Amino acid sequence: MIGAAGQIGRAAVPALAEDGWEVTAASLGGGRDERWPGEVRAVRLDREDGAALAALLGDGADVVVDLVAYGRDHARQLTGLADRIGSAVIISSGAVYEDDRGRGFDTQGEPDGGPRYPVPIPESQRTVAPGDTTYSTRKVLLERELLAVGDELPVTLLRAGAIHGPYCRSPRELYFVKRLLDGRTRRVLAYGGRSRFHPVHVSNLAELIRLAALRPGSRVLNAGDPQAPTVAEIGAAIDTVLDRKTETVLPDGPPEGTVGDHPWAVEHPVVYDMAAAERELDYRPVTGYVESLPETVDWLTGQLRGRAWTDAFPKMAASYGTGLFDYAAEDAWLERYDQGAS
């Protein structure tokens, strides 16, 4: 397993080990999780070093699980070793899809750039063009390169939704948890709180990896939880976990600057069709979004204890900026909102 020390690997390694696989957990730091069975072998691997990957494979592996593959170079590393790999399971992303007018995740900042996907999105939905310019285009390039070799290397590509659970480097749930810990009793959610961005818990993703390892094949499958709640429902569920009450203000329009913005802020629903995974892998989710929240919230609370959120989650700060918690702007907006309502 490549990239095993990250969020997905922490869950996927034990899922495979408990299924009887001999697991070599490779990561840049070579670390291991305390919950991994003792027989799991943890090794150092620089994902960019093709020679090191070839040396690690040695005479071969029944399955290679790559959690960090990205772009043409990583794909060609794997296809170049196809004679030593029985099959592969690769993490891709639901961000690869575009709608019938060519709108996708990369166009959301443009006027009328928000994609309008079918609900739910099947794997047959068109994708962005492959390329080297964005996360989405590079994931498509990865997919195309891997699928092009056909039976020479059976590859299951899992198009993951919004990954959540403990050890996430950019946890969307932080948006609500931090506000509650800071004593905020009101919040503003754009688009009437109706935004839906299909989540997938790490344990469900690990289950899909486990099943795909058992049933090799060349295919693309969506990876999502059994539910795709609205952002308003997510906020209410986190309120319940922390036993807090929050008034939620729901303007119909888009965010006004930072006000109303949040990590799930899509105008139109993004919901993935899980029928193919159920049919081809006999996939059944391990958990649901709401059921998984207590563990996630407890982990987030612990990470925030005694330190600034930007120190606890620097990657999230870099991705979203500090505007997620611009309370002054939100309070000024709410004051105007209250005056207008009266």
Image: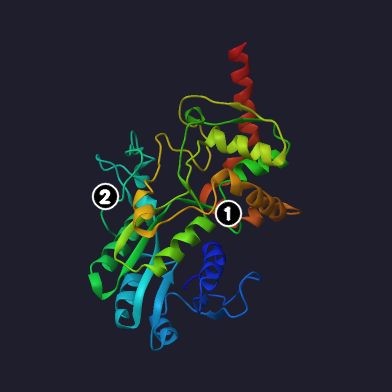
The answer to whether residue 29 is above or below residue 117 is: below
For image coordinates 41% across by 88% down, the residue present is: 58
| Color style of the picture | rainbow
Left or right of residue 177: residue 62: left
Depth order, front residue of 88/257 = 88
The answer for how far apart the CA atoms under marks 2 and 1 are is 28 Å
Q: Which three-letter amino acid code belongs to the residue tagged 2?
A: Ser
Image quadrant assignment for residue 197 = top left
Per the image, the residue denoted by label 2 is 124
Q: Which mark is residue 165?
A: 1
Q: Which three-letter amino acid code belongs to the residue tagged 1?
A: Gly
Image quadrant assignment for residue 29 = bottom right
Left or right of residue 38: residue 270: left
Position of the C terminus, as image quadrant, is top right
Disc nearer the start of the sequence (2/1): 2
For image coordinates 47% across by 41% down, the residue present is: 228
Element under disc 2: loop
For image coordinates 24% across by 72% down, the residue present is: 151
Q: Is residue 318 visible?
A: yes
Whole-percent x and y of residue 312?
A: 66, 56
The answer to whether residue 72 is above or below residue 308 is: below
Whole-percent x and y of residue 264?
A: 49, 41
